[in-house]
């Protein structure tokens, strides 16, 4: 059984000044996930490890480094899916959680799917997830963006005004199990309580051992409308290659929704890995034991 992992650090107009940080960060995330798989760990453990690396880095819009909402606060969303059981864990609009993907993991181990705001934080805390002062998640760059109105949220703007930076990972382990994870701070200047596609199964992420695993990035309001992650999995179910399925889902986003921008990473049960996007750039990386090569795009 092949091993495979892919990670992304967001689609959008990623500035040249951040490309080196994006490249280093995405490679570190790939390292973390690949190491888990090569040591016999599960796909679920691999995507959590990879995503947590990106949540700790200020270059990415997830965890530490998240954009600020209209009130100057960090509110994060995250989603996680186990392709073996179809169990899902997701959190939305949470504050004061150091690694939101760990909060999603806490929900995954309950009978439920999605919790929001303080209730999600309570579940995370009960599970031993690290909490923090919400202000400690604000970086100087994001604070300056908020103060100057840079990248302000506009419901019809797409990604043209700045990077989306949502992060995520998909993986295939030695037992043939698949998993997907996505984490984000959302859109800069968003109204408090706004929730995008990232914690929505089928929109921001999806995993099913019988078909594949996908994590998306981009303008959440458009991705949610077409359930882009599930559309990519559907392509695999129809017999397309991973790259064909990924491209098909992204084409649908652009064709069906005016201003629909984004991208995705996808892994098939046979270890095929693919990425596709219609934004200016998408930071991503992948490795598969099928060819044992590492690919970094930033």
Image (cartoon, grey):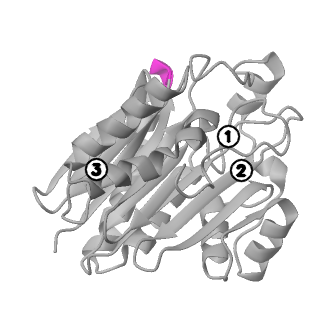
Residue shown at 29% from the left, 81% from the top? 40
Q: Is residue 102 above or below residue 64?
A: below
Q: CA distance from mark 1 to mark 3?
A: 24 Å
- Of the pair 257 and 197, the residue shown nearer to us: 257
Count residues near mark 1 (Cα–Cα under 10 Å), then give few for <14, some for 14-19, many for 20+: many
Choose the circle earlier in sequence order: 1 or 3.
1
- Mark 2, residue position: 76
Q: CA distance from mark 3 to mark 2?
A: 25 Å
CB within 8 Å, label 2 to label 1:
yes
Helix, strand or loop for disc 1: loop
- Of the pair 73 and 230, the residue shown nearer to us: 230
Q: Is residue 246 above or below residue 219?
A: below
Which residue ends up furthest to the right in the rendered image?
71
Choose the circle earlier in sequence order: 2 or 1.
2
Region rendered in magenta = 13-18
Q: Is residue 70 above or below residue 82?
A: above
- Mark 1, residue position: 186
């Amino acid at each position: 059984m092949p091993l495979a992992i892919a990670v992304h650090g967001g689609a959008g107009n990623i500035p040249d000044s951040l490309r080196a940080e994006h490249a280093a960060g995405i490679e570190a995330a790939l390292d973390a996930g690949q190491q888990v798989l090569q040591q016999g760990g599960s796909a679920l453990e691999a995507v959590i490890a990879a995503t947590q690396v990106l949540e700790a880095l200020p270059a990415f819009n997830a965890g530490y480094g998240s954009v600020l909402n209209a009130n100057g606060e960090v509110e994060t969303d995250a989603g996680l899916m186990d392709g073996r059981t179809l169990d899902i864990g997701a959190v939305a609009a949470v504050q004061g959680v150091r690694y939101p993907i760990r909060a999603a993991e806490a929900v995954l181990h309950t009978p439920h799917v999605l919790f929001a705001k303080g209730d999600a934080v309570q579940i995370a805390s009960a599970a031993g997830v690290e909490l923090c002062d919400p202000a400690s998640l604000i970086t100087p760059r994001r604070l300056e963006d908020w103060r100057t109105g840079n990248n302000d949220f506009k419901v019809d703007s797409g990604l043209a005004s700045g990077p989306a930076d949502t992060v995520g990972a998909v993986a295939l382990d030695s037992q043939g199990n698949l998993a997907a994870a996505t984490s984000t701070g959302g859109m800069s200047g968003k109204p408090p309580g706004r929730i995008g596609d990232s914690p929505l199964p089928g929109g921001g992420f999806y995993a099913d051992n019988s078909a594949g695993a996908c994590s998306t990035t981009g303008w959440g309001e458009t991705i949610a409308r077409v359930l882009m992650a599930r559309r990519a999995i559907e392509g695999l179910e129809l017999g397309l290659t991973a790259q064909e399925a990924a491209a098909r889902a992204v084409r649908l986003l652009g064709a069906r929704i005016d201003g629909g921008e984004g991208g995705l990473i996808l892994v098939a049960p046979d270890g095929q890995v693919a990425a596709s996007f219609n934004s200016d750039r998408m930071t991503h990386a992948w490795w598969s034991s099928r060819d044992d090569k590492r690919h970094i795009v930033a």
